[in-house]
Image (cartoon, rainbow, N blue to C red):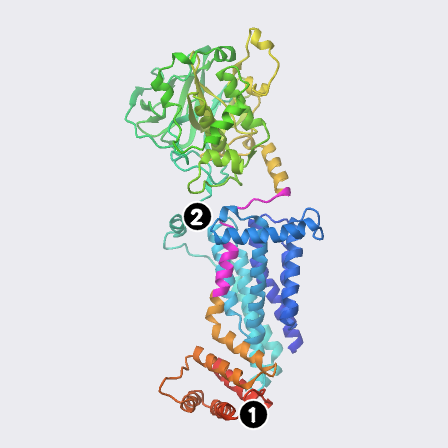
Amino acid sequence: MTKKLSLILLFILSVLLISEWIYPFAELTELSTASWIILFITLSLASFFTHLRYYWTIPLHIVMIYVVAGIYYAKDGIFSGQWFSSFFQITFSGFSDMVQFRPSDISMDFIVIVFLIALWLLSYITTYSILRKQRIMSVLILTVSYLAVINTFTDYNSSWAIVRTVLEGFLLLHLALTSRIATPNRLNGNSLKRNGIIYHAFILFLLAVFVFSSLILPKKAPIWPDPVPVIRDALGINTTRTVGYSEDDTELGGAVKKDNATVFKARTDNGHYWRVESKRIYTGVGWANEKSTELQQFSSGDNFPIQLSEETTGEAKTAEISFEASSEYAPYPYGTQAINSAVDTFNANLTTEKITPTDTIKNYTIELKTPVYNIETMQKADFSTLPDSFVSKYTQTPSKLPKRVATLANKITKDADSIYDKTKAIESYLSASGEFTYSTDDAKETPNGADYVDQFLFETKIGYCDNFSTSMVIMLRTLGIPTRWAKGYTPGEGEKDAKGDKATYTITNNNAHSWPEVFFPGTGWVPFEPTATFSNPENFQEPTTETANKPDTPNESSSEASKPDTTEKTPEQTDGSSSTGETKQAEQAKTDKVNNTLKIPSWIWWIPVGLIVAIAAAAFIFRRRIRSYLLLQTLKKNPIFSKTYLKLLKSLASYGYIRQSSETLRQFAVRVDTELGTNDFSKLTKIHESNIYSQTSGDRNVTTAEIKLFIQIITLLTK
């Protein structure tokens, strides 16, 4: 294989190898394409492969970083003055946030800039390892480690990327080894030239056999349990939860993953909120788990011990519940009158209002009536009749709740005439004002010392049902309105029976949901729906008196919130995490937002930082070789002999050849020559001493003969 062809193949394989760093980064950060970054590393490697000097490569890379970042983020084009100023502002602010350890404030455009800088350094190290040392193992290990970490701790599947990397690495190692064997003075160099085609073909054949065997041969199951979950928990990076009902709501916030697994099916007349429990104490970061012993035991068929509504209407109906797997809790709708099941005994927690069977339950039937939510009655409700202890219990807020939350609540409700109107005003502000975006992917974690509600209302304005419902509860409480936080499931996806009188609703983990409940004297606990893009499935009766003639105001809900929800919800129209699930409108809004600005998860910035740390570690490991390389580069510039000799002494020290205090310079030179098997250093030492004591040649340049001596010593050191 000719030297030129070998160099071309090395270049192509280097591009492919470094590209493996780019694909997961582009996918995890939702870049529109990875092509521009691949072009960046192609040009970067080309500049190093063609031995461009640093005064060309540095400006070239700065310009390329500016252009590539601009292609992704410059709204007015990369040549606009706005992008020019934004580029430097982004860079300065990003480095400031990194130094001050504020990862949540680092923007995506800065992450891309840092990643490009890291790729610049990686390109240089790769070129140096291949062309100078004919070795690639260090870069290969870094790449495999990077992909393994990405595969373990993110959603990116890098299984095939690791396979490609190993193949590319073996080919690079093979070509690098071939170049070393083919160099002059190698005993088997001529043999390699004669049998080159056979040699290369045999290596490719072995690689093909290994890959094919690894794909078709059976794999043994792991003996040890997966340590990754433990590691993730220990490092505190388990920030992305899976949707579904969970008892623990002590720390809310962060993104959640979808889960389409079915929890239960309900055969009933129309959709309902499937209530599981309620919570009362807000801590500033979540809802406290109350340790209550207020348990009331009841039997199958008994009157339901939890009466949420003070009035119901119509004939009793039934809802048939069937869990996919046995459950330790029993969801129930508003208006529940009794539960009938083969499990005879149930416990009702009167504090959280959670129903648990004495044994696990899989099937049961609920008797229910339609609760009455009369808007006129709620508008005229007399809250002065409520006991102070009750109001105090359900208007609790943390002592450190920022004052601007209450200020905002008062501002929104300043024109409302009744407590019901105030409640609807806040519900409408959260769900229909356009100020807030529904997203399960872009929801942020609560920083240390921050308040969950305050962060959502004034900082991020992005979240899912937990954010919306908790914010409504706390804003209402600042107004003195008794409110609590309820959680369970949305109606799910319904399919009509053949007769058409009932429908079977499928409730999945994606339907897990939370909502606020407000207490109205004469009505009871009333559910509201502040989450953007969602509608309330419960039936609200319009006023029948003169209040019905009032003009529509922003305080009034939409007709969909005031009328029974006769439409069937699809999986996309349900929430879930301990609440998630996105509507089609929410997904469209999310798509539009991504087109304008990309939001990043908090862990993303660790990728370029980790890359920089890895490169710094490699630089430390190979520091002696780097020092030797720099000394060789210095010799090409015909430097001063005395300065070059001192640099050689430092290089010797880095390899462990340290002059003792009792040694003369000549004695040290003899010791070094003895260990290296040469006498070149002694020759240079004599020249150095002669220069020192000479009055005419102390600052003279290195001669050609002396350069050869320096090179021979450096070559022996690196070997």
Residue count near mark 2 (Cα–Cα under 10 Å), binned few <14, some 14–19, many ≥20:
some
Per the image, label 1 sits on a secondary structure element best described as loop
Marks 1, 2: nearer the viewer? 1
Q: Is residue 621 visible?
A: yes
Residue at figure coordinates x 57%, y 29% from the top left: 533
- Which corner quadrant holds the N terminus? bottom right
Query: Where residue 615 sits in the image (x, y, percent)?
Result: 50, 64
CA–CA distance between discs 1 and 2?
A: 67 Å
Mark 2 residue type: Ile
Q: Name the residue under label 2.
A: 237
Residue 463 seen in this snapshot: no
Q: Residue 696 carries which label?
A: 1
Residue 125 percent across, percent down from the top left: 55, 68
Q: Is residue 400 above or below residue 714?
A: above
Identity of the residue furthest to the left in this view: 293
Please state the horizontal and vertical placement of residue 176, each as a whole percent of the image: 56, 74
- State which region is magenta: 595-616
Residue at position x 54%, y 24% in the image:
412
Asked if residue 608 is among those painted magenta in the image, a careful observer would answer yes
Per the image, label 2 sits on a secondary structure element best described as loop
Q: How many numbered marks does the figure carry?
A: 2
Q: Which of marks 1 and 2 is nearer the N terminus?
A: 2
Of 385 and 301, the residue lying toward us:
385
Q: In this view, does 126 lie to the left or right of 289?
A: right
In reply to whether residue 388 is colored magenta, the answer given is: no
Taking 171 as reference, is 409 above or below it? above
